[in-house]
Image (tube, helix red, strand yellow):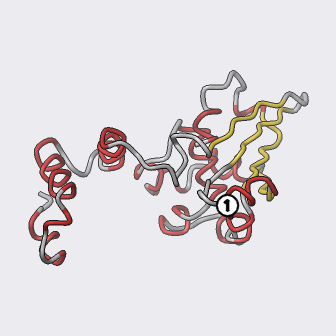
C-alpha cells in the first residue's frame, strides 16, 4: 500500500537511486534470497521487493502482476535491485501489539538526494482493519479482473457472503464453474 501511494509521486522511477522499505521484524526475517529474484508466481507473490517494485511501476498489485511478462520485466528486476529492506522497531511494536497493525514505509531516494516517502498501516487500509462489504467487493473485482465476469462474479460473491450457511464447503468449487 505504501508503494501504491508513491506511484503518484512526481519522481520519475528512472531517477531513483535507492528504495528504502521499512517493515516489521517478521516481514524482514521472512524475506530470503529467492525473493530478490523470483522466478515463479508463487515466489513473487511472497516477495516484498517484487511487490514494491510492481506497485511503483504499475500503480498496484493484482493477479496481472504475476504474469510471466511482468515477472521477467527488466524494469522490475532493475528496481528490485535498488531496494533495501530494513526493520523499523516502531512497526515491529505495532505488529506485535493489540490490535495488530501491518505498517510499512517506502522511501524513494533520487540520485540528487531527494526523498519521497509514503506509509501504510494503522489506518483503514491496514490488513488487520475490518473492511466494509463495499471494500471487499471492490477488492474481489480488482483481483478477479479477466478471470471472473459479471453475473458469475456476483454469484460467487453472493455465495461467499452466505458462506456460514453452506453445510459442506466441498460443494463450493462445483457450485461456481468458471467458463
Q: What residue did someone put label 1 on? A: 97
Q: Nearer the viewer, residue 47 or 14?
A: 47
Quadrant for the N terminus in the image: top right
Q: Position of residue 37 (x, y in %)?
A: 65, 63
- Residue at x-position 49% and y-position 46%: 61
Q: Is residue 147 left or right of residue 106?
A: left
Q: Is residue 72 left or right of residue 15?
A: left
Q: Position of residue 129 (x, y in %)?
A: 50, 49
Q: Nearer the viewer, residue 14 or 58?
A: 58
User: Furthest residue to the front?
Assistant: 98
Q: Position of residue 12 (x, y in %)?
A: 70, 27
User: Furthest residue to the top?
Assistant: 10
> In terms of image quadrants, where is residue 15?
top right
Q: Position of residue 127 (x, y in %)?
A: 52, 52
- Residue at x-position 61% and y-position 54%: 101
- Residue at x-position 52% and y-position 42%: 125
- Residue at x-position 60% and y-position 33%: 5
151 up-or-down from 84: above or below:
above
Amino acid at each position: 500500500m505504501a508503494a501504491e501511494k508513491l506511484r503518484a509521486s512526481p519522481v520519475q522511477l528512472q531517477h531513483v537511486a535507492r528504495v528504502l522499505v521499512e517493515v516489521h521484524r517478521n516481514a524482514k526475517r521472512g524475506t530470503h534470497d529467492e525473493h530478490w529474484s523470483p522466478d515463479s508466481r508463487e515466489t513473487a507473490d511472497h516477495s516484498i521487493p517484487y511487490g514494491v517494485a510492481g506497485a511503483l511501476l504499475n500503480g498496484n498489485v493484482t493477479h496481472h502482476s504475476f504474469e510471466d511478462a511482468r515477472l521477467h520485466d527488466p524494469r522490475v528486476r532493475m528496481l528490485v535491485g535498488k531496494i533495501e529492506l530494513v526493520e523499523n522497531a516502531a512497526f515491529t511494536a505495532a505488529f506485535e501489539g493489540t490490535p495488530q497493525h501491518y505498517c510499512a514505509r517506502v522511501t524513494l531516494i533520487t540520485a540528487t538526494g531527494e526523498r519521497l516517502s509514503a506509509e501504510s498501516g494503522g489506518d483503514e487500509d491496514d490488513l488487520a482493519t475490518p473492511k466494509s462489504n463495499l471494500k471487499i467487493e471492490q477488492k474481489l473485482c480488482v483481483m478477479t479482473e479477466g478471470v471472473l465476469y459479471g453475473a458469475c462474479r456476483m454469484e460467487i460473491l453472493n455465495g461467499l457472503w452466505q458462506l456460514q450457511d453452506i453445510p459442506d464447503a466441498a460443494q463450493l468449487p462445483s457450485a461456481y464453474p468458471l467458463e
